[in-house]
Structure formats: C-alpha cells, structure tokens
Image (cartoon, grey):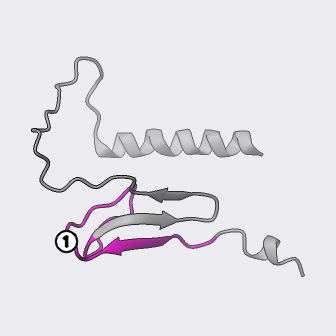
Amino acid sequence: MDIESTNTKMKPIAWFTPQIPVSFGPLEYNGLPGLVILVEMSNRTISASKIVLNPKEKIEFKKLIKGDRITEEKYNEKMKTLWNSINKNKE
C-alpha cells in the first residue's frame, strides 16, 4: 500500500497566541481565542511576518476609485470558479 496515495490531504494546523486576544487570522483561519500566527497545510505554510500593536502612525484606507460592488455570495462564486480553473490547469 502506498502511504502517499491514501493520505493526500492533510488537515490544516493553525498556531495562535492567546496573548494577543484578537480573533483574526489569514484566509478562513480565524475565530480562535487569539491571533493566528501560522497555518500549516499539506503544500504550503502561511505565517505572520510582522505584528504591529498600537501603531504610532495612523492607518488610512483610501476609497476605491475603480471596481464594482458585489455581494459576498457573488465573491465566493468567483473565487470558487477561479480555484476550479487553477486546479484544472494543474492536472
């Protein structure tokens, strides 16, 4: 029996710190009782490279000039289509 062919998908592992009590993390990896600082997946790792608490400089968000507003459902549909096309190209 080939171990790789039977275990191709690994459940992601999220590392978080309760010392920074914000329920935030990358992608859909949030909702934990602390800041997610690392997510390990079967073929990639996402990690925090810099954390700034109480920045001295004010953070400004610029209003978008271009683009259309879409609903979350429409966004999710577009992302699903994109991922499906990426996965199809890998085959």
Front in this rendered view, residue 91 or 48: 48
Identify residue for label 1: 21
- Above-or-below relation of 57 to 10: above
Q: Residue at x 24, y 67 (%)?
A: 23
Looking at this view, name the residue that lies furthest to the right. Answer: 1
Q: Is residue 29 magenta?
A: yes
* Above or below, comparing residue 60 to residue 34 in the picture: above
Q: Residue furthest bottom?
A: 1
The image position of residue 85, as x and y in percent, is 63, 39
Q: Residue at x 43, y 65 (%)?
A: 38
Residue 63 location (% of width, % of height): 16, 25
Relative vertical location of residue 66 with respect to residue 1 in this rendering, above or below: above
- Horizontal placement of 83 versus 21: left or right? right
- Residue 89 figure quarter: top right
Vertical placement of 91 versus 46: above or below? above
Residue ID at (32%, 65%): 30
Instruction: Residue at 77%, 46% (x, y): give it.
Output: 91
Count of labels in the image? 1
Q: Position of residue 12 (x, y in %)?
A: 52, 70
Identify the secondary structure beneath mark 1. Answer: loop
The kind of residue on which mark 1 rests is Pro
Query: Is 81 placed left or right of 2 in the picture?
Result: left
Residue bounds of the magenta highlight: 10-34
Q: Nearer the viewer, residue 19 or 90?
A: 19
Relative side of 91 to 64, left or right: right
Q: Position of residue 16 (x, y in %)?
A: 35, 72
Reply yes or no: does residue 4 show up in magenta. Answer: no
Q: Main secondary structure of the magenta part?
A: loop
Quarter the N terminus occupies: bottom right
